[in-house]
Amino acid sequence: MRRGGSRWFEGVRGLLASLAFLVVVQPLTAQDAVGRFASLRGEIASPAYEGWWPNDDGSFTLFFGYMNSNWEQEYEIPVGPDNYFTLTEAGGLDDLELEALEAAVADQGQPTHFYPRRNPFLFTVRVPADFGDKEWVWTLRTQGKTNRAYALLSSDYRMDPQVMSTEVGGNFGSLDDRLRTNMPPELEVEGDDHRSVRVGEPVRLVAIASDPDNYPAPREVGSRAPRTLEALYRGPGGSVVQSGPGLRFAWSVYRGPASVVAFAPVQMKTWMDSRVWANSPWSPPHVIPEPPEDGRWVSEAVFQEPGDYVLRGVASDGSQFTYKNIFVTVTRPAL
C-alpha cells in the first residue's frame, strides 16, 4: 500500500463485503464465517486519505474518510488524544509512537462518531496554493492501536470526479468519461444551522436537494431482487460494491452518540453496507427511491440524552456527495 495508504485494496473490500452471502452458502457456523471473513466487533477503525484535486483559485482540496473494520461496532471518539489532526513537514509523523496533539489545529472537521465499514469521501480540508510538500496527518486510535492517514499533494493521489465515482462503485461501476465533469448535487437545509432542543423534543429537518446536471441520470434497470437461491447468496460481481445512479438524501449522526438519536422516517444508510436488504444504496436488492416531487426531504430527529450533536445531511447522485451539517444542543427536559 502506498504511503498515506488509505485507499483500500479493492479485492479485500470485495471479499469482506461478501460475508452476508458466504455465511449462508458455506457449510460453516456463523461464528466460523465471521472469524474467517470479517468481524462484527473488536476490530480497529483506520483513517483514510482519499486523494486531492486542484481548485480554480490555486488552492487544493484534500479528501478524507475512514474504514471501520467491524460490521456492527461503532465508535465514539471525541477530538483529542485519540482523534486529531497535525500539520507537519513530510515524514514528520511516520513514527507512530510520536504524539503531536496541538489543540489549535486538532479539529479539522473530522467525525467523532464512526459507523461500521467503509465511509469514503466524508470530509475535506482545503489547503493553500503554497502547501508544497507539507502533510496534514490524521491520527486515530482504536482498540489501543494508532493509525494515521497522511494527506500530501503526491501526484499519484490526484483525483477527479470519475475517480471518486469508481472508488464508491457509483453508476453501477461505470467508467464513463462524462463522470470527469459530473457536478455534485446542490443542497440546502431550511432554518438555522444551530438548533437548541430538550431531550425528547423533535427537531424538524427539511432538506432541499437537486442534481444540477441530472447526471448520472437514474435509469430503469429492473428489480435487483434475487430470483433464485443461487443469486440470493452470490457475492458482488466485482471487487467493488456498486450503487445505482440517481439523486438520494439521508441524515446521519456525525458527532455525538448515534444510538440515542432516532430519525423519522428511518434514514437510508450513508455507509457502504453491502449486505442484502440493508437499507443502503450499496445493498442488493436496494433500489434508489424516487426523490420527493418538490425536492424536499422532511424528517425529524429526537435525542434521548443531553449534549452537543452534529447531524450530517448527505445528498448524492451515486457518484459525488454534498454535505450539510446541523449543530444541535440538547438540554435536559424541564422539571
Image (cartoon, rainbow, N blue to C red):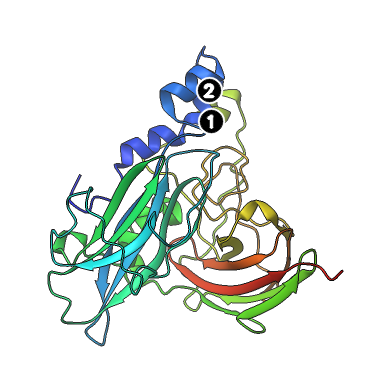
In what quadrant of the picture does the N terminus appear?
Answer: top left
Q: Residue at x 23, y 48 (%)?
A: 96
Number of residue marks: 2
Label 1 is placed on what type of residue? Ala
Residue 53, x across and y down, in percent: 26, 71
Question: Which quadrant of the structure image shows residue 62?
Answer: bottom left
Residue 280, x across and y down, in percent: 57, 49
Q: Is residue 175 left or right of residue 215?
A: left
Residue 275 appears in view: yes
Residue 20: mark = 1
Residue nearest the viewer, comparing 239 with 309: 309
Q: Which residue is mark 2?
A: 23
- For label 2, count other residues whose C-alpha is less than 10 Å away and answer few (under 14), some (14-19) or many (20+): some
Residue nearest the viewer, comparing 237 with 75: 75
Residue closest to the far right: 335
Residue closest to the far front: 335
Residue 318, x across and y down, in percent: 48, 60
Looking at the image, residue 237 lies above or below residue 108: above
Q: Is residue 17 left or right of residue 260?
A: left
Q: Residue at x 51, y 38 (%)?
A: 71
Q: Residue at x 54, y 68 (%)?
A: 315
Q: Secondary structure at mark 2?
A: helix
In what quadrant of the picture does the C terminus appear?
Answer: bottom right
Label pair 2/1, CB-CB below 8 angstroms: yes
Q: CA distance from mark 2 to mark 1?
A: 6 Å
